[in-house]
């Protein structure tokens, strides 16, 4: 049913920021794995995200030896999402795998990921079940995964594993920027793709250090808001802002009404009722949210650029 890998071809996309120490070993192992799977129908695309070390020189060298190894180099550091997005744009084959450049992800897992893909999935994500990272990283990550699971409706243990396998259609519909790479499985799920995960080996970082600092959590959270807004409410901003706004208005009005009745019945002065302030604030903020939703609707109506649907197939 599925054509052999040597017909469909495999593109590996790897974001690289200052990973010169691990690249040679990674290239060697990837070449071995991909040749075994797909003969010569594979490519390894390194996207150098503004490295200041010799990373790109290693890629250039490897390219001279084996033209299936390709390199794209950013002028400066744009972030992992941008690196993946560019790599995806250049990927030519029907099957696409991503992995980190630091050897924490094991190239030997690629065959298993692809095998699961061929069972009828569009995206198979790695799950670092036994994780070799410091506690200050694994703990927030647990929380992150729980929140994204709950919000997205896609139950995964590990959204942000670098090791993933895709059918090419998936990467063509994804729009990645900011720190969106953390939500790839959720984005794909919302587009209607079939997404799953399997446990994979994870290794300690041997060389260099992690490229993400504490700011990852704040940025990650803000991007979650963007993801929710742009995927779920892109075409109907009034549903999001209007419902919160209406709720606030109703609650505010009910409180104000209660206070008014109380005042009419028996002379409590509204000047010493702090609740009045809350009622007024609720009503004003509620009205503002509804207005924002309406303005959003106008903007959506103006812009035809965003299609709401993607067609899977036609007969
Ligand atoms: N990376 C990148 N651009 C960045 C940060 C990271 O291309 O701005 C790459 C990095 O070289 C690695 C992968 O993304 O291949 C994952 O980064 P890292 O290992 O530092 O993340 P961690 O494993 O600590 O989550
Ligand atoms: Mg890493």
Image (cartoon, rainbow, N blue to C red):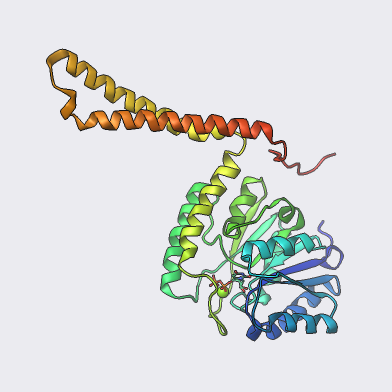
Give percent across and percent down for residue 301: 66, 31
Q: Quadrant of residue 272?
A: top left
Residue drawn where x is 56% and y is 83% of the image: 208
Residue 97 visible in the current orientation: yes
9 sits to left or right of 161: right
Residue drawn where x is 83% and y is 75% of the image: 68
Q: Farthest residue in the top direction?
A: 265
Quadrant where the N terminus lies? bottom right
315 sits to left or right of 162: right
Give percent across and percent down for residue 80: 62, 66
Quadrant where the C terminus lies? top right
Give percent across and percent down for residue 144: 47, 58
Q: Quadrant of residue 8?
A: bottom right
* Residue nearer the viewer, 58 or 183: 58
Q: Farthest residue in the front direction?
A: 271
Residue 153 visible in the current orientation: no
* Residue nearer the viewer, 293 or 16: 293
248 sits to left or right of 67: left
Q: Taking the image as four quarters, which one is ligand 1 found in?
A: bottom right
On screen, 134 above or below 79? below
Give percent across and percent down for residue 191: 66, 46
Residue drawn where x is 72% and y is 56% of the image: 171
On screen, 74 above or below 85? below
> How many labels sit on residues?
0
């Amino acid at each position: 049913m599925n054509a052999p890998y040597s017909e469909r071809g495999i593109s590996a996309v790897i974001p690289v920021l200052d990973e010169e120490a691990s690249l040679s070993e990674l290239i060697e192992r990837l070449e071995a794995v991909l040749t075994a799977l797909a003969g010569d129908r594979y490519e390894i695309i390194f996207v150098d995200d503004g490295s200041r070390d010799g990373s790109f020189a290693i890629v250039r060298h490897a390219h001279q030896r084996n033209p299936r190894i390709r390199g794209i180099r950013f002028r400066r550091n744009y972030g992992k999402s941008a690196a993946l997005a560019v790599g995806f744009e250049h990927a030519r084959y029907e099957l696409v795998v991503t992995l980190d450049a630091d050897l924490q992800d094991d190239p030997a897992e690629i065959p298993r990921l692809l095998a699961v893909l061929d069972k009828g999935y569009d995206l198979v994500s790695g799950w670092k079940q036994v994780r070799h990272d410091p506690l200050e990283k694994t703990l927030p990550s647990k929380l992150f995964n729980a929140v994204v699971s709950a919000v997205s409706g896609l139950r995964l243990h590990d959204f942000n594993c670098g090791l993933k396998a895709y059918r090419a259609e998936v990467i063509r519909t994804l729009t990645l920027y900011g720190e969106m790479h953390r939500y790839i499985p959720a984005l794909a799920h919302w587009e209607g793709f079939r997404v799953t995960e399997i446990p994979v080996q994870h290794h300690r970082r041997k060389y260099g250090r992690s490229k993400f600092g504490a700011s990852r959590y704040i940025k990650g959270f803000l991007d979650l808001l963007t993801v929710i807004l742009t995927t779920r409410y892109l075409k109907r901003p009034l549903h999001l802002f209007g419902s919160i706004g209406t709720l606030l208005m109703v609650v505010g009005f009910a409180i104000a009404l209660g206070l008014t009745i109380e005042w009419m019945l028996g002379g409590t002065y509204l000047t010493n009722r702090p609740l009045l302030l809350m009622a007024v604030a609720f009503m004003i903020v509620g009205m503002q949210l509804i207005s924002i939703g309406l303005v959003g609707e106008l903007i959506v109506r103006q812009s035809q650029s965003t299609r709401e649907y993607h067609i899977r197939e036609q007969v």
